[in-house]
Image (cartoon, coloured by chain):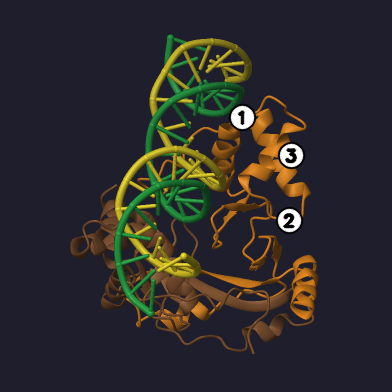
Chain colours: A orange, B brown, C yellow, D green
Amino acid sequence: MEIKGVACVKKMRMTPQRRVILEELRRVNDHPAADEIYRRVRKRLPKISLGTVYRNLEVLCELGEIQRLELSGSTKRYDGVPNKHYHIRCVECGRVDDAPIAPLNQIEDDLYGTTVYEIIGHNLEFTGLCPQCSRLHGARQEAG
Amino acid sequence: MEIKGVACVKKMRMTPQRRVILEELRRVNDHPAADEIYRRVRKRLPKISLGTVYRNLEVLCELGEIQRLELSGSTKRYDGVPNKHYHIRCVECGRVDDAPIAPLNQIEDDLYGTTVYEIIGHNLEFTGLCPQCSRLHGARQEAG
DNA sequence: CTAGCTGCAAAATATTTGCGCGAGC
DNA sequence: GCTCGCGCAAATATTTTGCAGCTAG
């Protein structure tokens, strides 16, 4: 039985481009934007286009191989680990790391009955300064 | 004593444009994007430009009169209520409402010592289907 | 006069899409 | 042959910026 009304029966081949994008994303610990993935993948596939990177990131998300991070900020970022976990984002440089905290599994229950929405999920993002930016920031404050 | 290195001494007048933007944002319950604010404000100030709207939203955030929502999604949204609170976003239509749940004041403590970041804050966003989209979605599933 | 603000338009940024070609089944 | 995916370029969407003129103090 398949979910009706959703095109989940689309045939998808593991093309070289798709494979390399997935490999590069799995290989790193950070959470790159499409642009950064493009730069890395191009070292191995110099002729790949940015459009292909965007298209394949979308496909890989649909396949559940990766996840698109639901973070604030202007650029979308991708995570090679498809499991649910939280993130912390540097407000200065945009760097994103995993947040070492377990998922709040029951927090959505608090909303049942109090919202008109049909709840699907939630997303917790911490903001802060990464070590590099924290150092610069601190130095500036003390000196200024 | 002022925060050093930050231009917080800038003189800012409450111009007609700025006042109308603030009034319109305070008047509504939803959390409009700059574009929607522009359309509403233009009914009262037909000659205002979109650039002015963006500039003033930025200024009003700095003044603490409004807040820019740190939500995922491609467009920035603004909240006329400057107090900290969480939101729920419809994944279908992008509508954003306040989430009826109290702030998790101590959650940032869980990260101290376990992250290299200097923590500034956090942000919890729920995702779901608003009543309108939920109805359409449900109908589609049953019919499909 | 000066600093801040405006409207307008162009630029910048990030992402999506149309198109024609090529490869695999 | 048909479908899917590709590279390329153009289009789209959103936000920022340069500029010259205006206004309040």
Measure how far apart labels 1 and 3 are at the Cα level.
12 Å
The amino acid type of the residue labelled 2 equals Asp
In the depicted view, which residue is nearer to us: B31 or B137?
Answer: B31
First in sequence: mark 2 vs mark 3: 2
First in sequence: mark 1 vs mark 3: 3
Q: Can residue A119 be seen in this view?
A: no
Image location of residue B127, percent across then percent down? 44, 66
The amino acid type of the residue labelled 1 equals Ser
Measure how far apart labels 2 and 3 are at the Cα level.
13 Å
Locate residue B80: give its quadrant: bottom left
Image location of residue A80, percent across then percent down? 68, 51
Do tags 1 and 2 sit on the same chain? yes
Q: Which numbered tag is attached to residue B80? A: none
**Element carrying mark 3:** helix
First in sequence: mark 1 vs mark 2: 2
Measure how far apart labels 1 and 2 are at the Cα level.
22 Å
Q: Which numbered tag is attached to residue A49? A: 1
**Element carrying mark 1:** loop
What chain is tagged by disc 3?
A: A
Q: Is residue B32 visible?
A: yes
Give the residue number, with chain letter if any, for mark 3. Answer: A40
Residue at x 41% of width, y 76% of height? B66
What chain is tagged by disc 2?
A: A
* Relative height, residue A144 to residue A14 (above, below): below
What chain is tagged by disc 1?
A: A
The amino acid type of the residue labelled 3 equals Arg
